[in-house]
Amino acid sequence: MPANVNESVSESVGEGVAKTPQQLEEAKEAARRAFIAELWRRFEGLQEWAISHWPDQKNPLSSADFVEARKEILSLRSPAGPLNQPEKQDAAEPKPEEGGAQYLDTTPAPWP
């Protein structure tokens, strides 16, 4: 098994052949998708095991107890997902030394 993603990418694209940046990017994307698919498959197995082996039968686990974990795994599918949006917003605004705001209020307004 390769020690890192770059090794697995070069193995999946082909050995000894010069790769274009697009081929490398496509191979990285394929490796990322394969990882996420395997992670999902293993998580489903873990969830089934946890539900069937939960020791407190008076308060049994259900698939609803794993909703947040499923959301986190699904957020890995899109590299431009909600976790990466703040970075893009920050990159669009000028830095304080470039004349941008020194403080940005990120606290949401209270519900009316």
Image (cartoon, rainbow, N blue to C red):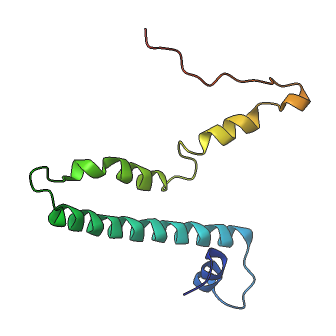
Residue 91 rendering spot, x and y as whole percentages: 75, 38
Q: How many marks?
A: 0
Rendered residue at 60%/45% (across/down)? 84
Q: Farthest residue to the bottom: give it.
A: 16
Q: Is residue 71 left or right of residue 14?
A: left
Residue 23 rendering spot, x and y as whole percentages: 66, 72
Residue 33 rendering spot, x and y as whole percentages: 48, 66
Q: Is residue 21 left or right of residue 70?
A: right
Q: Is residue 25 left or right of residue 1?
A: right
- The answer to which of 100 and 54 lies nearer the viewer is 54
Rendered residue at 14%/56% (across/down)? 56
Vertical position of residue 21 compared to residue 105: above or below: below
Vertical position of residue 109 compared to residue 15: above or below: above
Q: Is residue 30 left or right of residue 112?
A: right
Q: Quadrant of the C terminus?
A: top left
Vertical position of residue 40 compared to residue 98: above or below: below
Residue 109 rendering spot, x and y as whole percentages: 53, 15
Q: Quadrant of the N terminus?
A: bottom right
Q: Farthest residue to the left: give it.
A: 58
Rendered residue at 63%/38% (across/down)? 86
Rendered residue at 72%/36% (across/down)? 90
- The answer to which of 6 and 70 lies nearer the viewer is 70
